Amino acid sequence: MRLVSVMHHTQAASPQDSQGRAAPFLIRPAAGSEAQAAAAIAASQREALSAQMLVSGALLFRGFDLRTTEEFGRLVDAFSGGSPRFGYAGGASPRRVLEGGGGNVYNSTEYPPAVELSLHNELSYSGLYPRLLFFFCLIAPQQGGATTLGDSRRILSRVDGSVLQAFRTKGVRYVRNLSPDLGSGYSWQDAFETDDPVEAEAACRHLGASFEWRDGFLRVSQVRPATARHPVTGEEVWFNQADGFHPSALDKETYASLLAYHGVEDAFRLTVSFGDGTPIGPDMLAEVRAAIAAERVEHRWEAGDVIVLDNLLIAHGRAPFSGSRKIALVML
């Protein structure tokens, strides 16, 4: 493999599991090399690494003894050549900015540990989304907590033809009802990183989203394509979060509680339909979820790991966990 011969300072491994599903291309320091060589390798082998990502969609730097967000930030900058980082203002998940690392370093999604996050492509519901994701393990989970991965090309190929055609033709309408409860993680202030309604409205326009105010809630709506084409390879990929935004993704207790409080699904924090407003039927959602589940693989973290994902080629999620877990994220 060309990357192995070019990257003479590393050891590399196959980018697929035994069933051909997504697995990161593994990069380790060669025997006798300095543990902190990750940034140097990323800079000197940038072209070869980028070419490899078009095949595997993901890279794993392991064994480089990375411990701080500053070291992580240097690896990100070396890999990207100092490209501007992507901010998360307007995103749907609760996140916090972490100190150090050169700015726009976030924690991974702060949903409760018992909640599983389904496979998704970051900000696929938005008119603006990152191309690359860098995840850094500061504290490995004691039990569970794997980051799940799935090849978006293979997910697309698994979706039934009639279901896929419906998604392609109609697109997906995402609706978020953001509360006024500052600090909840689900407020419009938290989502848009401002307490100024005018700035929040401007951010919606920047993202290509429509919006309206309802009793202090900011209702944000956006219609997006259900698939995308990779800008380099031209491959079509599954690129939406219909299954995750749909109320049927909630556990029965949470669903019943929200329905009792709001009265209708349309007032839930997250709702979704086809782009023309018609419902996405349960049979179609079951087909989509089965396709995603078939491609789901787990990456079990070790402290110091850095995973780089092509956000169009590889979807990611999170398995439930217990104990401490701290994963940092930078987007480009």
Image: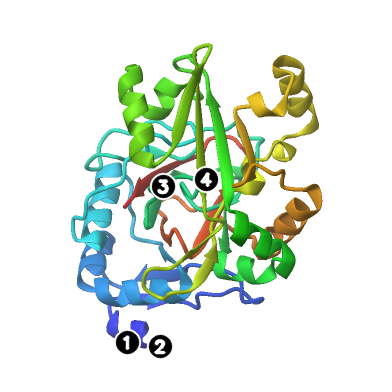
Task: Find residue 332 and report its horizontal and vertical position in percent.
Answer: 31, 52
Check if mark 2's residue and mark 1's residue have beta carbons within 8 Å. Answer: yes
Closer mark to the observer between disc 1 and disc 4: 4
> Which residue is denoted by mark 3 in the rendering?
127
Q: Vertically, is 158 above or below 87?
A: below
Comparing 48 with 252, the one in front is 252
Q: Which amino acid does label 3 sit on?
A: Gly
Mark 4 nearby-residue class (10 Å; few <14, some 14–19, many ≥20): many
Instruction: Tell me if 109 is positioned left or right of 49 in this view.
Output: right
Per the model, the C-alpha gap separating discs 1 and 4 is 45 Å
Label 3 – label 4 distance at C-alpha: 9 Å
For mark 1, give the secondary structure: helix
The mark that comes first in sequence, 4 or 2, is 2
CA gap, disc 2 and disc 3: 37 Å
Report the disc number at residue 1: 2
Q: Which residue is drawn at 39% across and 76% down?
A: 52
Q: Which of 280 and 84 is in front in this view?
A: 280
- Per the image, the residue denoted by label 4 is 223
Residue at 71% across / 28% down in the picture?
A: 265
The residue to which callout 1 is attached is 5
Residue at left offset 44%, top offset 50%: 303
How packed is label 2: few (under 14 Cα within 10 Å), some, or many (20 or more)?
few
User: Which amino acid is tagged 4?
Assistant: Val
Q: How is the image coloured?
A: rainbow
Residue type at the position of mark 2: Met
The first of marks 1 and 3 along the sequence is 1
